[in-house]
Amino acid sequence: MTDLSISAVNHQVRLAARPLGLPTGANWQFSEAPVALPAEGGVLVKVLALSLDPAMRGWMNEGKSYIAPVALGAVMRAGGVGVVVASNNAAFAVGDHVAGGTDVQEYWRVPAEQIQRGGLTKIDLRLGTPAQWLNVLGMPGMTGYFGLMDVGQPKAGETLVVSGAAGAVGQTVGQLAKIKGCRVVGIAGGPVKCEWVVRELGFDACIDYKQAAPAGAAGVANWDAVREGLKQHCPDGVDIYFDNVGGDILDTVLTRINRKARIVICGAISQYNATSAVQGPKNYLSLLVNRARMEGMVVFDYAARYPQAVAEMAGYLREGRMKSKEDVVTGGVKVFPATLNKLFSGENFGKLVLQVAPD
Amino acid sequence: MTDLSISAVNHQVRLAARPLGLPTGANWQFSEAPVALPAEGGVLVKVLALSLDPAMRGWMNEGKSYIAPVALGAVMRAGGVGVVVASNNAAFAVGDHVAGGTDVQEYWRVPAEQIQRGGLTKIDLRLGTPAQWLNVLGMPGMTGYFGLMDVGQPKAGETLVVSGAAGAVGQTVGQLAKIKGCRVVGIAGGPVKCEWVVRELGFDACIDYKQAAPAGAAGVANWDAVREGLKQHCPDGVDIYFDNVGGDILDTVLTRINRKARIVICGAISQYNATSAVQGPKNYLSLLVNRARMEGMVVFDYAARYPQAVAEMAGYLREGRMKSKEDVVTGGVKVFPATLNKLFSGENFGKLVLQVAPD
């Protein structure tokens, strides 16, 4: 059961050193290994595409988090999609498309135990493309779905603001909130993203946090624009803020929340490369005045309910009620280091996907 | 229906200027007015004691909060207890003890409309002393009760940490959490308060945040002591943190919270006199990692349920399961300005009460 050319080489990207601030070439190491056939009960997956996520930056740090750090010298952790090219497991046939923790490499040899633990999932390409399975039908989509529905608890007529609106999580959150009857205002960097979010995704408005910032100054933000934009586009205040960025945007939104508002803390990409202390929300006492709540979430907690969310969102995709955008970078694993850094400069437009092999 | 000597003078304390930082004498103005008999449907109350609360500092600021600021030139807002000395309202008789928004003055002339809105409540001195009616049976007690029960949602076996443990809200929260089966660790300033919290109130431990700080340096804190104390006294982490202080203590506790922890934001006395920006919790991403929640509360929202909480806590007082401590300052309204500032230096020990007239 294999169509694997036995001479294949597995190119891998390993974590060489823990970064201080933005990752550089010195943090990575490239390695090659012969591709080995699967062990008893295992399968071998050829990786097609990898999901590049802000959370990866956290996995590179030492120390306790919601998941263990990537060990020095280990292949960098990543989720991805691929196709089974050799199988010793009756549940998976050569040619099956799958998703799981492929890591940053060309071939993923999945042991039987990992399959038993549910670490390998078949994906149905009739529901979405491989890139969509890394986006709205994958981790970012699940994050947006459960963060919004379970933590944000949207009610029709409420106003939702989402930062990173054009990003992987943000696009799902905003579209889903529209479907649930909310007024939806995005925050994103640059007019192209903002226009797309409104025209293509149907958000009610999108605030450009880089608006009128010095030309070409990547990452430079204009907090007055955010403040004014919130006043203008959220005349009834903010009931739900879905935060992917932290920092000054979180602080600005805190000044506009309503009573009993819910702030979903999903991420804080503005702070992930901070070399000094993380910037705490100095307006957090707005939670007190407004009897509001700020709550963190981690998508893995909802794993048992992924199928339900996938079914619902695949329906929206099919009906054209939801769109998805992926920023697919080609070039294989060797461009992984440079591609990852696009997330932190805000250069990516849509869910950042690294294509490892053609579909 | 009056035993009022018609020659009585009402001494009042008014807000003269909005403070920058800690209030000074320049922020206050003393005035006198003749005492007037109640209008149709109203009553006249002789004030016995006033509640001095950290929230007063916020009321002195300009700008939107959960309650309107005190107007410049107006009598300073305060809650208090008193005795009816003249009545034109059939529901209140001379000699009735009452609680309400007396403000900082010796006589409170309550109009009919305020009584109709529920602004005057009879208190039963068999359930507690006037000072206790400003403490565990009053606003601080109600704040502790609903903040803990509704927002904190304690479960037996969980660990609760409360800052300002010897203060008005803290003493109620800790004792109530013990009654509900929690492990309770207080944080307070100085060995006397800490010892009292453990020996008299039955907390499992109390961390002295001033421990080994330079002698006589009021307000100087030792964050290492807090960190080490939390490690030592909360071996299973922190499930509920009831925060009255904000600042570095909040940040330190955030590093020790458990999954699904609840942080009740009740106040932030360390920040109320800040002349620069409030210190935001730089460890707020611990909420994300731990799927935890930080939520604000304002006691007024629970007004309809005060009687239920009063009945429960009066029962605990009667049974000796709950104690209360008030720091009663005599000297009348003229010592109000200096007495209020005791709150911000942490000099008060127990609920700070200003006695205006003998019971």
Image (cartoon, coloured by chain):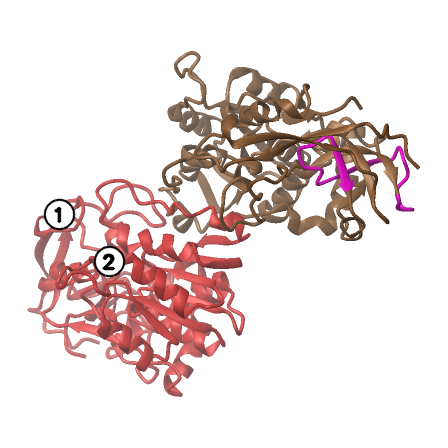
Chain colours: A red, B brown
**How busy is the neighbourhood of tag 2: few (under 14 within 10 Å), some, or many (20 plus)?**
some
Quarter of the image where the C terminus of chain A is located: bottom left
Q: Nearer the viewer, residue A227 or B335?
A: B335
Residue A16: image tag: 1
Residue corresponding to mark 2: A221
Q: Earlier in the sequence, mark 1 or mark 2?
A: 1
Residue B99 within the magenta-colored segment of the rendering: yes
Quarter of the image where the N terminus of chain A is located: bottom left
Residue A138 visible from this viewpoint: no
Q: Are the two marked residues, 1 and 2, in contact with CB atoms closer than 8 angstroms?
A: no
Q: Nearer the viewer, residue B62 or B99?
A: B62
Residue span colored magenta: B88-109
Residue occupying the point 44% across, 33% down: B21
Mark 2, secondary structure of its residue: loop
Residue B102 location, x and y as percent?
A: 71, 37
Residue A183 within the magenta-colored segment of the rendering: no
